[in-house]
Amino acid sequence: MAMWARQRARHRRRAAAAVLAACGSALAVLGWLVVRQRPWPGGWPAWWLPALACALGATALVVRPLDDPDRWARGAEGERATAELLEVLSRRRWAVFHDVGLPGSRANVDHLVIGPTGAWVVDTKSYRARLRVRRRSVMAGTAELPTGPVRYEAEQVADLLGCPVRALVAVHGQGLPARGRVRDGVRIVPAHRLVRQLRRGRWLRRRLSRRDVRRLAGDALRRLGPASPR
């Protein structure tokens, strides 16, 4: 939400600058048209007016806002929604952390979940566009849903905790099949199926005991950056 506030302020500044530059360009063109009908007082050359109009028009194109600051707000709301879904996990058997920082990196983990089925890094994605599933990818509009960042985060957390860590992407949006998709070792699931996916390992031969969960949770608090524990 802090990033959304900064991006929104930047968006407004760029929009105001673009409007001012466009208005200046229009006034310069108007002045040039007037000068063509009536000589410039004092015989000054009028060639600089179209040049000014071109310069201001180019400035308006350069500074116009291209980003969507509201995507940060949608991302924050998606992370909150995912956190609410994770509330159903028993606190006696599961440890859940939100917004975990990676030491020495600007990356952060949306959600770190440690429980009987192991350690999981969960990334939240929120999309307004309907998702389209292809053979090896998931598309949101014309953009492909990325899995590289969450895979990298899972690898970093695994190195810090000294245990295997699996990566998941929880998607808030329409169009993704209930079973999700697997891409580059990362499972992509609809957000409402997230908890079911985390619990699916209940029949694994080797499961983490409560002592193991507490130990890994303590390691996460000591070795990872500031987080918002549940």
Image (spheres, rainbow, N blue to C red):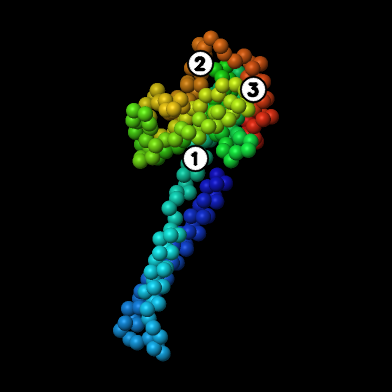
Residue depicted at 52% across the width and 24% down the height: 166
User: Where is the C terminus found, in terms of image quarters?
Assistant: top right
User: Which residue is label 3 attached to?
Assistant: 216
CA gap between label 3 and label 1 equals 28 Å
Q: Is residue 131 left or right of residue 83?
A: left
Q: Name the image quarter holding residue 177.
A: top left
**Residue 119, image x, y percentages:** 57, 23
Quick one: 230 or 29, which is closer to the camera? 29
How crowded pointer 2 is (Cα within 10 Å; few <14, some 14-19, many 20+) is rated as some
Nearer the viewer's eye, disc 2 or disc 1?
2
Label at residue 104: none
**Residue 148, image x, y percentages:** 48, 33
Q: Is residue 209 above or below residue 180?
A: above
Residue positioned most to the top: 205
Callout 1 amino acid? Gly
Quick one: 147 or 213, which is closer to the camera? 147
Q: Secondary structure at mark 1?
A: helix
Residue depicted at 46% across the width and 44% down the height: 71
CA gap between label 2 and label 1 equals 28 Å
Q: Name the image quarter holding residue 131.
A: top left
Callout 3 amino acid? Leu
User: Which residue is label 2 attached to?
Assistant: 201
Asked if the residues shown at circle 2 and circle 1 are in contact, with their CB atoms under 8 angstroms apart, the answer is no
**Residue 112, image x, y percentages:** 57, 28
Quick one: 138 or 4, which is closer to the camera? 138
User: Which residue is label 1 attached to?
Assistant: 75
Callout 2 amino acid? Gly
Nearer-N-terminus badge (3/1) = 1
Q: Secondary structure at mark 3?
A: helix
Q: Is residue 87 at least partly visible in the picture?
A: no
